[in-house]
Image (cartoon, rainbow, N blue to C red):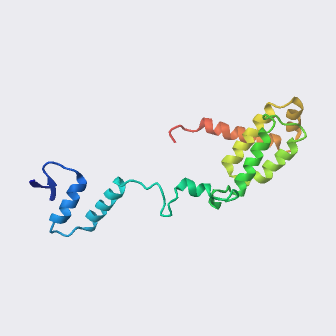
Amino acid sequence: METKDCFLKRVPDDFGRADDYVKRSRLEGPHPKSQDQELDELLDASVFAEPSATSPEGKSQDQKIDELPDDFVIAESFAKPPEEEARCRFVEQLLADGGRIEAKELPGLLARLQEEGPSWGTRWRLRCSALLLGCVARSSRDCRIAFVAEQGGLAMLGQVLSKAIAGLQADPKQ
């Protein structure tokens, strides 16, 4: 078989199998390989290698997972931060009864939003406030009256509406 020098790399004329060429080039080549060439060969070998279905112990990944105890915690890093858990509980409480709120629940929800809301961040606090407003709007008339009468209710409505207006008036190119 003849070979040609092409871009300073020896390539077979018949473009045979690449792994045969690598084996032959190792035997033929008197030139030491550079680190880049060795890395390329290593990467090519690992990319085209067949993945092993079992570990050195002879067990598949699925079998190892099945053997874990039921109370095994995969990773603590997947746990939500306390602020996010509090926000999720707040949202779940709002949506528990189909998004309808009783007038007697409203003072506690507003107080919780004012106390815990700042730790959620401005964006999430405004979203939760808007969700609370939506839930109040679809609730009974008594609940809407209680919202207007409650301290901080109209202030929260003003914050959400002013942010909404600012968003609508913002330059779309920014």
Where residue 164 appears, x then y in whole percent? 67, 38
- What residue is drawn where x is 36% and y is 58%? 46
Q: Nearer the viewer, residue 166 or 35?
A: 35
Up-down relation of residue 143 to residue 6 (above or below): above
- What residue is drawn where x is 14% and y is 48%? 14
Give the tally of numbered discs: 0
Looking at the image, residue 135 sits to the left or right of residue 149; the answer is left
Where residue 8 appears, x then y in whole percent? 15, 59
Q: Nearer the viewer, residue 125 or 153?
A: 125
Up-down relation of residue 73 to residue 172 (above or below): below
Residue 157 visible in image: no
Up-down relation of residue 40 to residue 14 (above or below): below
Q: Which residue of the protein is positioned furthest toward the front in this rendering?
A: 58
Looking at the image, residue 21 sits to the left or right of residue 152; the answer is left
Residue 66 visible in image: yes
- What residue is drawn where x is 12% and y is 50%? 13
Q: Nearer the viewer, residue 161 or 59?
A: 59
Where residue 153 appears, x then y in whole percent? 82, 41
Looking at the image, residue 31 sits to the left or right of residue 108; the answer is left
- What residue is drawn where x is 18% and y is 65%? 27
Where residue 9 appears, x then y in whole percent? 16, 58
Looking at the image, residue 114 sits to the left or right of residue 41; the answer is right
